[in-house]
């Protein structure tokens, strides 16, 4: 008998939490996992939470598929990459026209597009869905970015709407566009997440090494900032991370954690996508690069041996400057991220709604913040303009960019690395100047490669008469 409203394969942390969330919202969910031991554990967890009546565990794939009501919506939550393709192939013989696979991992959007195109002629829907919010989000309300087969989305919509985070009662879930649109938006979400995290870390560096603050004092500052314009999940958890104490030693945990950041790929994908479309996303690129440099600990230790310890020259930067610098950097970073989304929308014909994206990021996801509410309100007025020229943000930038400038300047003098904040400042300075220096680049390009340049009023494929450098 098919009694389940939806199915889910892959009961690792994210999958099992999503399944419990679905069951809790009153939907019956069939579950399956490659290893049966994990299914047993899930059954026990569901029982403990009083949700066993809403979960149907199946140990055989065929039985699992048969347990789901048609047209079927089957969530797969397996490791991104080949395991997703393998799962699709295993499922295919059991599926029927009109059924849909809903892939909720952090997949590369071009893979999602390929899978969508592959399944479409077979009459099987494919939804590539970005789910943000980590373990807790999956269990109690993630932000959900949907892309792919629209008809099949409507079958799953009630369930995904019920489990999504709510912001002032509005569910943080939306259908964003065909094919890989949902996973693309999730990728850029993660790129922005990298930028936010890196800028926070850079500011922490000044607090620690420039202002001589200990982790407890830093934690207090982040706690206070979380009550102001920077209010966000990442600022909140930063306060908690800085306040944590290592039990065995009684020392601040953050001081014991090795300064090598991991990364699983979404930041790199967003930087590549931006570069490929010719959209500058220097804050995201900087954040990715900063993680890569961090991971080269041995090289850094050796280089410090050569150049000596950074001077950490005394700075007159205040905590208020740091707060405003972070706000300005964040606006630039989001301006870049949304510009990448706008361009991808145009190139792929996705018609991505920027206001809706900002709205569904207001709760549930890792980058959730007060700021996104302001941003969705600004985009709701219409248009896809760069955030830096949207009036509400112009006012904040005018007020805060001098602080960003002061902080980046002090960082340069004091030998504090600020890959991300300085990239944000340079982008701002490049973007807001009418007269740049690319006239010289064009002259150089024409000199060595006859690439041509434009002179207003005279034409666009002009050339200079350049001296020969041969034999000089
Ligand atoms: C989210 C997170 C989540 C995951 C990141 C971590 O939105 O819930 O982004 O997807 O924690 O992918 O990425 P890195 O390991 O690359 O930092």
Image: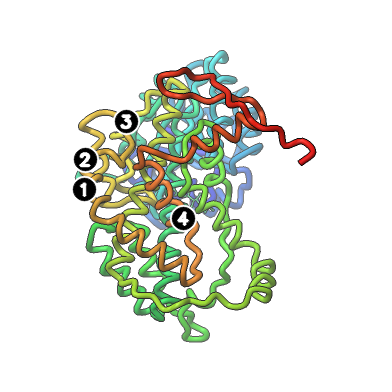
Q: Are marks 3 and 1 in contact (CB under 8 Å)?
A: no
The mark closer to the camera, 2 or 3, is 2
State the residue at coordinates (56%, 20%): 117
- Furthest-right residue in view? 471
Q: Earlier in the sequence, mark 2 or mark 4?
A: 2
Disc number placed over residue 391 in the picture, else none: 2
Query: Residue 404 sits in which quadrant?
Result: bottom left
Residue matched to label 1: 395
Is 458 placed above or below 88 here?
Answer: above
Tell which circle, 4 or 1, labels the residue nearer the N-terminal end.
1
Other-residue count near label 1 (Cα within 10 Å), few / some / many at <14 / 14–19 / ≥20: few
Report the disc number at residue 384. 3
The answer to the question of whether label 2 and label 4 lie on touching residues, with beta carbons closer than 8 A, is no
Q: Are marks 4 and 1 in contact (CB under 8 Å)?
A: no
Q: CA distance from mark 2 to mark 3?
A: 13 Å
Quadrant where the image shows the C terminus: top right
Visible in this render: residue 64? no
Q: Which mark is residue 420?
A: 4
Real-space Cα distance between discs 1 and 2? 6 Å
Q: Earlier in the sequence, mark 4 or mark 3?
A: 3
């Amino acid at each position: 008998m098919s009694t389940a409203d939806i199915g889910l394969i892959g009961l690792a942390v994210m999958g099992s939490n999503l399944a419990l969330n679905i069951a809790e919202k009153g939907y019956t969910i069939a579950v399956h996992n490659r290893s049966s031991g994990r299914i047993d554990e899930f059954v026990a967890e569901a029982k403990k939470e009083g949700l066993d009546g809403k979960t149907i565990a199946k140990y055989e794939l065929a039985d699992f598929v048969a347990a789901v009501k048609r047209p079927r919506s089957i969530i797969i939550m397996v490791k991104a990459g080949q395991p997703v393709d393998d799962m699709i192939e295993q499922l295919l013989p059991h599926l029927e026209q009109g059924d849909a696979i809903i892939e909720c991992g952090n997949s590369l959007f071009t893979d999602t597009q390929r899978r969508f195109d592959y399944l479409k002629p077979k009459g099987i829907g494919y939804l590539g869905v970005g789910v943000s919010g980590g373990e807790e989000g999956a269990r109690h309300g993630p932000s959900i970015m949907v892309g792919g087969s629209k008809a099949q989305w409507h079958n799953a919509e009630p369930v995904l709407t019920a489990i999504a985070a709510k912001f002032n009662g509005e569910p943080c879930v939306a259908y964003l566009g065909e094919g890989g649109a949902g996973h693309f938006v999730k990728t850029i979400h993660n790129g922005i997440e990298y930028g936010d995290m890196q800028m926070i870390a850079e500011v922490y560096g000044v607090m620690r090494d420039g202002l001589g603050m200990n982790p407890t004092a830093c934690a207090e500052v982040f706690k206070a900032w979380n009550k102001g314009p920077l209010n966000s999940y990442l600022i909140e958890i930063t306060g908690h991370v800085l306040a944590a104490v290592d039990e065995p030693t009684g020392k601040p945990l953050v001081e014991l954690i090795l300064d090598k950041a991991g990364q699983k790929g979404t930041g790199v994908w967003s930087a590549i996508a931006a570069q490929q479309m010719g959209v500058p996303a220097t804050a995201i690129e900087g954040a990715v690069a900063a993680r890569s440099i961090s991971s080269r600990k041995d090289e850094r230790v050796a280089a410090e041996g050569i150049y000596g310890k950074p001077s950490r020259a005394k700075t007159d930067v205040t905590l208020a400057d740091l707060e405003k610098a972070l706000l300005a950097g964040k606006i630039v970073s989001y301006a870049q991220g949304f510009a990448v989304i706008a361009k991808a929308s145009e190139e792929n014909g996705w018609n991505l709604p920027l206001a809706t994206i900002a709205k569904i990021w207001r709760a549930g996801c890792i980058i959730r913040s007060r700021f996104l509410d302001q941003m969705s309100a600004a985009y709701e007025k219409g248009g896809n303009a760069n955030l830096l020229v949207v009036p509400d943000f112009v006012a904040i930038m005018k007020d805060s960019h001098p602080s960003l400038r002061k902080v980046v300047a002090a960082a340069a003098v004091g030998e504090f690395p600020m890959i991300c904040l300085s990239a944000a400042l340079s982008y701002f300075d490049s973007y807001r100047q009418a007269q740049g220096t690319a006239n010289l680049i064009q002259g150089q390009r024409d000199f060595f490669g006859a690439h041509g340049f434009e002179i207003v009023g005279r034409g666009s494929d002009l050339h200079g008469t350049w001296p020969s450098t041969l034999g000089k």
